[in-house]
Image (tube, rainbow, N blue to C red):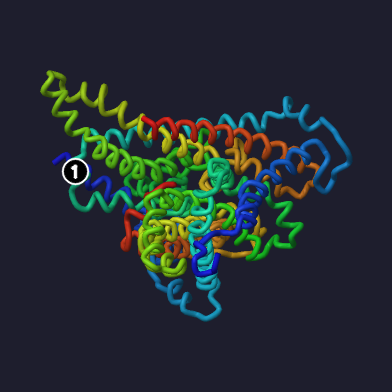
Amino acid sequence: MRSRLLAFLLILLFGLPFGLLGLLAVGEGWRFPAALPPVYSLNVFRSLLAADNDLLAGLGRSLLLAGTVAVAATAGGFVLARAIARSRRAARLEAASYLPYALPPVLLAVLIQPFIIRLHLSGSVGGVLLGLLLVALPFATLLLGSFWSGQTTEYEHLARTLGCTPRQALRQVLLPLAWPRLRTALVQTFLLSWFDFGLTNVLSVGKVRTLTVQVFTYVGEANAPLAAVASLLLVLPPAVLLLVNKSALLRKP
Amino acid sequence: MSSKARPFRLPSPLLGLYGLLVAGLPLAGLAYALLGSVGLAGPLAAGFTGRYWQALGADSGLPYAALFSGWVALASLGISTGLALLLVLRAQPTLRRWPLPGLLYVPLLLPALVVGFYLFQFLSRAGWLARISFRLGLISRLEAFPELVQDGAGIGIILAHVLLTFPFLTLLFLAIYRESRLDDYRQLTLTLGANAGQFRRRVAVPVLLRRAAPTLLLSFIATLGAYDIPLLLGRPYPQMLSVYIATRLQRFDLRELPAAYLAGFLVAVGLLGLISVLLRLTRRVRVE
């Protein structure tokens, strides 16, 4: 009985956000003190299909930005983690990798903003991309660092001894061995960028309207239905990733 | 050496470039903030001055933001840790039963901004809980509902962080419980005459907290620097640190910039100090 009650409470606790966001998205003219919306409508969802829909554009922008960050940070992190593992200054470089990842994203954005302005990247996708990579690249590098152990080097040497070219060793030995970690790095750096609001908002000066920036704008305009739809769209990709690979969401560098 | 025999290796200038990006840019930002705080950098730089540092003693904004952030981080982490320990040590069989193992991952899908928006819609005075209370006759007017968001004590902010953190900590404690074979220790302590409460207090809790210490400290630091949730659920005063700094930097009055740079510099240095403690702690836990 007690365990059923606990399960019910936890289901209620974690299910309620989706229920309320769903009601806000489909409810029309829902004002205090009504406990439920007087009218339900799918208009907001229908408008998503319109070609000039701002939310859909925001979704595309966020997907493109997060996807680019994930691929660039994971590929870069893989190569850099190996170089750091073999460097004489490995400990120093590893410690340096914690620096941007350790600061809150909005504080990091505030600190680097003068340089982003001097590079003429303020308010541009390029500036936001650079800011996000500054956090995601060291994160991926630290996450993939433990892959480059002595055993991996031995596998690589063995492949080379057996006649593999460096490219063959990379494609047929190292990448398949590293795939579980690469997948985790891809997922986590994607989410890092997907969830970000503070850094994007500061560096883009509100001009790069990703989904999180749109949620904030709609909240500011007291447009709860659109904020709810944008919130539900924000939850979609992580939900797909959760279904594909749960463990990739949890691993920390 | 022929190109065929040359191993796949990164040219060292790229490693230098990486160091320049990840350490150089933030450190340059810190230096710029420091110079800005003494009047040597920034749009209104007019030569060295110590007046912004001297004014720090008279301005209660930054210490108050630091205290408020500390309170929110401590309360959020304390409640989350307590809840997670309670679930792992008192209700583990339930947690292993469908659908709970999957359900605990659900908050990991939620961006902080969405949680902030959801709690605002749920807990504000015109929110869903207030409407339900009104319908049930628990309150007779809007003002009778307690202030749970944008309140002075940061209750809304704390609840939002607890909602995001405690499921993650529960998953973490469950993993540590299994890895540390605490079930075996439980059997052993019971055989030696201890009761279940003694096992929980003297064996399980110390092991779980010790092994999770780096993650707990990381969660504390992350909450200390939180921005999205306090921006939606917080008040203009008191503000949490990130909101305080970002708000001051985005004001139209450029004369505010040096003081904002000073606040950014001090907070960044403080957080980096905490991170160095975290790194030392992580190394010690790894060695043990």
User: What residue lies at 88% left-to-right and 41% top-to-bottom?
Assistant: B46
Compared across the picture, whether B41 is left or right of A34 comes to right
User: What residue lies at 42% left-to-right and 47% top-to-bottom?
Assistant: A252
Which residue, as the protein is rendered here, is positioned at the far front?
B1
Looking at the rendered image, the quarter that the N terminus of chain A falls into is top left
Q: Residues within 10 Å of mark 1 (few under 14, many from 20)?
A: some
Residue bearing the label numbered 1? B94
Above or below, B181 against A78 in this view is above
Which residue, as the protein is rendered here, is positioned at the far right?
B46
Count of marks, rendered view = 1
Above or below, B132 against B260 in this view is below
The image quadrant of residue A121 is bottom right
Q: Callout 1, which amino acid? A: Thr
Above or below, A132 against B160 in this view is below
Instruction: Please state which of residues A181 and B278 is positioned toward the viewer in this rendering.
Output: A181
Compared across the picture, whether A214 is left or right of B169 comes to right
Instruction: Please state which of residues B8 and B147 is positioned toward the viewer in this rendering.
Output: B8
Percent x, y of residue B198: 21, 21
Percent x, y of residue B214: 43, 35
User: What residue lies at 13% left-to-right and 24% top-to-bottom?
Assistant: B190
| Residue A124 is at least partly visible in this image | yes
